[in-house]
Image (spheres, grey):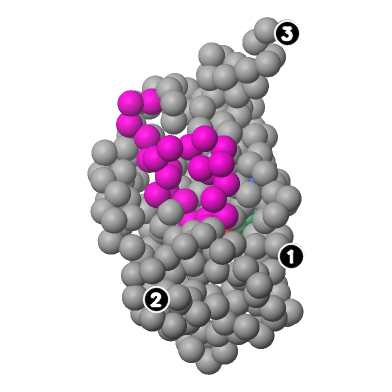
Amino acid sequence: MTGAEQREHARWLVSESRAIAVLTGAGVSAESGVPTFRGAGGLWRGRSAMDLATPEAFRRDPSEVWEFYHARLMGLRDVAPNEGHRALAVLEASRERFWLLTQNVDGLHRQAGSANVIELHGTIRTARCSRCARSLPISEALRGWTPGAVPACETCSAPMRPDVVWFGETLPEPALRQAEEAITHCDLMLVAGTSGVVQPAAAFAFHARARGARVIEVNPEETPISAIADVSLRGPSAHELPELLGEQERARLNPHTEDD
Ligand code: BV8
Ligand code: ZN
């Protein structure tokens, strides 16, 4: 199939679907200016997230891990959702059953208006205590922070940590349950912006396929998920995702054009 035929088929699959599960990764935030993990901008001081986003790194040198997250938060200050994020929010509003499973921790799906967002790997917007249940906006935990410091819990004085899931940590039970529900009940899984290497999230597409769901992939590059996709749209998500919307949905994407 040509690119245009692929897109036409993908649009038809979306229009026929009554229960859509979406799985997103760092690629959907790329056009908002957020570096992906395995792309060029994915390193920090020459280190990869794989080295720093781990409980071992935090035990070994919590101040360095906080510098890593502080740098990422600084990088999110002027970042806004893009057309791809917004297209998913519009698609959700037009479906009875819709789950947005995201591996991203940047909070951009919620900012774009998505409601049923399942943050599989947590969120960088919150800090939580490494010992007790205390949690608060990460901007508050970082008030007065300087490089080398480790924010301490005001309740039990243990080190605070970003409320993300590190490599080697299990995903939150509620997120896993919602992912199970999405995989079981969706008739379409739309996978956008993920290299499909991090488990167990990457396996969700395979499980949905095995249950008979159709799979659409949006990624400029081929990934392990391409092998089971009914359609792979080889383009950037900020362009490809709005193209999947029907006429009426697209009008809601840019409401001002309706009146033009
Ligand atoms: C766990 C939060 C139980 C932190 C992250 C099998 C089963 C279970 C676990 C494992 C397993 N095998 C290995 C493991 C261990 C590990 C794992 O998967 N390792 C991999 C690397 C081999 N998994 C875990 O540890 C998970 N825990 O399962 O617990 C357990 C525990 C121990 C042992 C066994 C079982 C926890 C994983 C969560 C880690 N935390 N993030 C933080 O962010 O700081 S993961 C991190 O990677 C981000 O969440 C990110 O989203 C995620 C995945 O990466 P992608 O999103 O795919 O991003 P990437 O850069 O890779 O790719 C971007 C893609 O976008 C590319 O394909 C590119 O082509 C595309 N793109 C670029 N531009 C665009 C675009 N697409 C569209 N439009 C564009 N414009
Ligand atoms: Zn505490």
Alpha carbons under labels 3 and 2: distance apart: 55 Å
Between 120 and 74, the one lying in front of the other is 74
Question: Which residue does the numbered mark 2 point to in the structure image?
Answer: 155
Residue mark closest to the camera, 1 vs 2: 2
Q: Which residues are magenta?
A: 95-118
Residue mark closest to the camera, 1 vs 3: 3
Query: Most extreme residue toward the top, as rendered?
Result: 259
Q: Is residue 96 magenta?
A: yes
Residue at x 66% of width, y 72% of height: 144
Q: Mark 1 falls on what kind of element?
A: helix
Q: Locate the N terminus by quadrant.
A: top right
Question: Which residue does the numbered mark 3 point to in the structure image?
Answer: 260
Between 114 and 101, the one lying in front of the other is 114
Mark 1 Cα-neighbour bin, 10 Å: few <14, some 14–19, many ≥20: few
Query: Most extreme residue toward the bottom, as rendered?
Result: 60
Mark 2 Cα-neighbour bin, 10 Å: few <14, some 14–19, many ≥20: few
Residue 172 seen in the current view: yes
**How far across and down, in percent of the image, does residue 95 sit?**
38, 25
**How far across and down, in percent of the image, does residue 255 sit?**
63, 17
* Label placed on residue 40: 1
Alpha carbons under labels 1 and 2: distance apart: 40 Å
